[in-house]
Amino acid sequence: MDNLQIFEKAAALLDAGDNVALVTVVSTTGSTPGKVGYKMLVWAEGKRTFGTVGGGLVEGRMIEQAGRMLSKPTSRTFTFSLGDTPDDEKGICGGSVELLIETFDEDSLPLFHDLVAAADSDESTALLSLVSPDALPHKILIRDAALSAETAETELSSEIVSAIKDVAVAGHGVTRVSAGDANAFIEGISRLPAVILFGAGHLADHVARYAKGVHFRVIVYDDRSEYANRQRFPDADEIIVADFGRALDKVRIDRRCYAVIVTRGHKYDEIVLEQVLKTDARYVGMIGSKRKTQTILDRLRHRGIPADLLDRVFSPIGISIGAVTPEEIALSIVCELVKIRRLGREPQIGHLALCRSGDST
């Protein structure tokens, strides 16, 4: 679940008069079910929740604790060592996890409105949470890596200031910093990365559903309204019907975008690829056999596209899982997107021969 959904839900609850607890995983060691940055909301005396911090025993205890803290704004940290937990309660994990519980009342509604706006914008921002056991919640939103007067007044250490700038510039990621008497949890707050599907055929249909399920925004682009429409892509965040030759006029592609080129023919693939390579897209993938892919790349090279840009292309597309059906090919593509999102990797042209037969439209 992404930050935007958490902040929107918190704002709605506060606006309705409910106090709400925000539980965040701020650090882990070893194997834990909840990863750094996981969030969960608790309200209604601990009877209602939204999001997750990993499930299981730890989450259950956090729900109970948060329910007891809801009466007034406060914050506390909790550390669990799963290695000391009985095997029938801890599952397969044996590491340790630190969690921060912060409770908010209606006075914090402006903060969450600001967080919603930041998470839904293209602006690079960071959220600083000063972690002080048994103290009031202290969250500061830093926009465009510029330290606000409020931040400066906290007299943060140079280590924390440097970490804030790094995270804000990146627009994503999380880090835990301890310096002197100050403990801080810093996380990037920005909108979800977008998968831009050039082509709205059968394969795109499956890619869209899988990508949405792993928390990408989905933009569908095709020149055929009978394919690119809300009936076929009900959960897409945006649907664009326009000529493939005008792609950059119709959709903004930046470093948070993943371009997946699966049009109905190699001619259109080439038209789109030549445009997308001029952008800062984090990922550029194009379906096609090794021979067809190389032919397209050779033509673009002869038209003056630099080799370093052509080397960015993931094609044939997807992680090698022996995919045959459109559903399997789509799964392999989305696996590759997740891998690039989480781990990063240089493209290797020719690492998987997925041909166009999986997208007959």
Image (cartoon, helix red, strand yellow):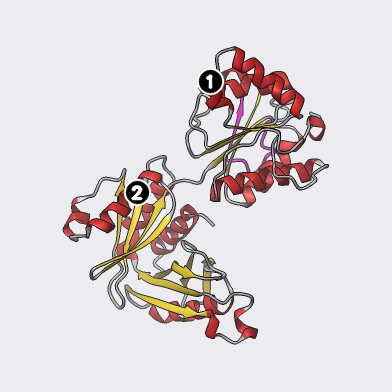
Q: Nearer the viewer, residue 145 or 205?
A: 145
**How many numbered marks, from 0 up?**
2
Left-right relation of 101 to 342? left
The residue shown at (56%, 85%) is 85
The answer to whether residue 209 is visible is yes
Quadrant housing the C terminus: top right
* Magenta range: 228-243
- Residue 231 position by quadrant: top right
Q: Nearer the viewer, mark 2 or mark 1?
A: 1
The residue shown at (67%, 42%) is 208
Disc nearer the start of the sequence (2/1) = 2
Q: Nearer the viewer, residue 123 or 173?
A: 173
What is the secondary structure assignment of the residue under circle 1? loop
At label 1, the amino acid type is Pro
* Above or below, comparing residue 288 to residue 171 in the picture: above
What is the secondary structure assignment of the residue under circle 2? helix
Quadrant housing the N terminus: bottom right
* Above or below, comparing residue 244 to residue 96 in the picture: above
At label 2, the amino acid type is Asp
- Provide residue 358's location: percent of width, then percent of height: 80, 35
Label 2 to label 1, Cα distance in Å?
30 Å
Callout 1: few (<14), some (14-19), or many (20+) C-alpha neighbours within 10 Å? few
Find disc 2 in the rendering and name its residue.
166
Find disc 1 in the rendering and name its residue.
306
- Provide residue 103's location: percent of width, then percent of height: 37, 71
- Provide residue 119's location: percent of width, then percent of height: 42, 49
